[in-house]
Image: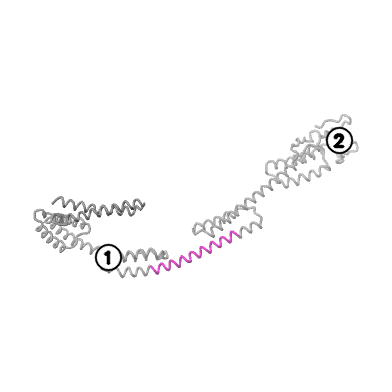
Amino acid sequence: MAQENTSTGTPAPHPVPHALGGGHAAPPVPPAEPSPSAWGRVDEEGTVYVTTADGERAVGVWQAGSPDEGLLHYARRFDDLRTEVELLETRLESGAGDPKHALATATQLRDGLAEAAVVGDIAALSGRIEQVIAHAEKALASAKQEREEARAAAVVRKQALADEAEKLAAESTQWKAAGDRLRAILDEWKTVKGVDRKTDDELWKRFSKAREAFNRRRGSHFAELDKQRAGAKHRKEELIAEAESLSESSDWGETAGRYKDLMTEWKAAGRAPKDSDEALWQRFRAAQDKFFARRSSVFSERDAEFSANAQQKEELLVEAEKIDPAANLDAAKNHLRKIQEQWDEIGKVPRERIRELDGRLKAVQDAVKSAEDSKWRRTDPEAQARAAQFRERVEQFESQAAKARAAGDERRAKKADEQAAQWREWLEAAEAAIADR
């Protein structure tokens, strides 16, 4: 309740509080109904007054009842204003109120408060209204900033989406993935709100143009791909025709080589249309299979013949490995010659037996030749001269190696070393022959 003015006997008005913008919250507004006489009076003529900081102000005339009833009526009207202000403030604080509507209402209340027909703490209510106005103005400013930030973020997002769409349109060859991504960009684009119409239209034109460019490039790609596949189909049909014409060939080696080349050309031809590529491949493979099945059958028969030849050559080897050139070199040479003639007459053996069988015969041949060489060395009158010649060549190549190595030419040095090693081997053989005489 307001303090009483001791000189006049009337209640002293509350001082006008600071508004919210000054950094101080206004004090609570006391309800007027419990003690309306603290805020006003009714004179003998029925004029109702409210006490303000500037003195009393007439707010109306009451003649319908007692003065107390008159004050109570105007006090209740004050409390209605008080309640309206508190409701505005509560809704602003909770975030449920519209700051723009709250500002308009509070401003209207403030502007009409000086003439309002009410009795109550006008100063406190004025301070509370100023607080609501400040609060509403701050909320409006904050909402505006949020809108601007949201708009800026929306612009940035749509710019990023447009940039991505343009990059996909210009560079991507992952047609399905890029097409799916462009559709996803469109779906996201629709959810991005708050961009001003002019900017939105400009960004939409960029995105739309990028989609159209991608679709044109993709369409051109698949048109070219269809053309290539039609060409591949024609080429594969040509290869099939040749493969089928070769399937009856008995020129096993050359034809097998040609089939290998045809396979390389088949792969290079590329893919035919999906609905015919597999059928073409089956025809091509059938022609190959026919030829190789025939060749396999012939080779199986030949392998049986070759196996019999191998058995005959094994029997010859048993005889050949009994030859003793040390006992009688001439007889050994004659015997080996006859075995070699029979060996050639027998013919081919299975491929996997060639090395084994030829190796055993070569061992016998080497033994006979070794005995013959030994005899020749012992009877050769030029053995000493030959050994000297070999020694000279060894020294010659060793000298070349040393010079090349000194010159930093390791390649020439290595080659000279290899030649020196070969001549040294012959020298050692020549000297061994001389020593065995």
Q: Is residue 79 magenta?
A: no
In the picture shown, does residue 419 fall above or below 226? above
In the picture shown, does residue 205 fall above or below 115? below
Dot 2: within a 10 Å radius of its alpha carbon, few (fewer than 14), some, or many (20 or more) residues? Answer: many
Q: Which residues are magenta?
A: 206-235
Q: Amino acid at mark 2?
A: Arg
User: Quick check: can you spot residue 364?
Assistant: no
- On the image, the x and y values in percent for residue 147 come to 67, 49
Q: Which residue is mark 2?
A: 41
- Residue lying at the far top of the rendered structure: 6
- On the image, the x and y values in percent for residue 298 come to 23, 64
Please identify the quarter of the rendering in which residue 278 is found: bottom left
**What secondary structure prevails in the magenta region?**
helix
Q: Is residue 224 magenta?
A: yes
User: Quick check: can you spot residue 432?
Assistant: yes
The front one of 409 and 153 is 409
Q: Which residue is mark 1?
A: 253
As measured in the structure, the alpha-carbon distance from the residue carrying label 1 to the one carrying label 2 is: 131 Å
Q: Is residue 288 left or right of residue 301?
A: right
The front one of 209 and 16 is 209
Dot 1: within a 10 Å radius of its alpha carbon, few (fewer than 14), some, or many (20 or more) residues? Answer: few
Q: Amino acid at mark 1?
A: Gly
Q: Is residue 39 left or right of residue 345?
A: right
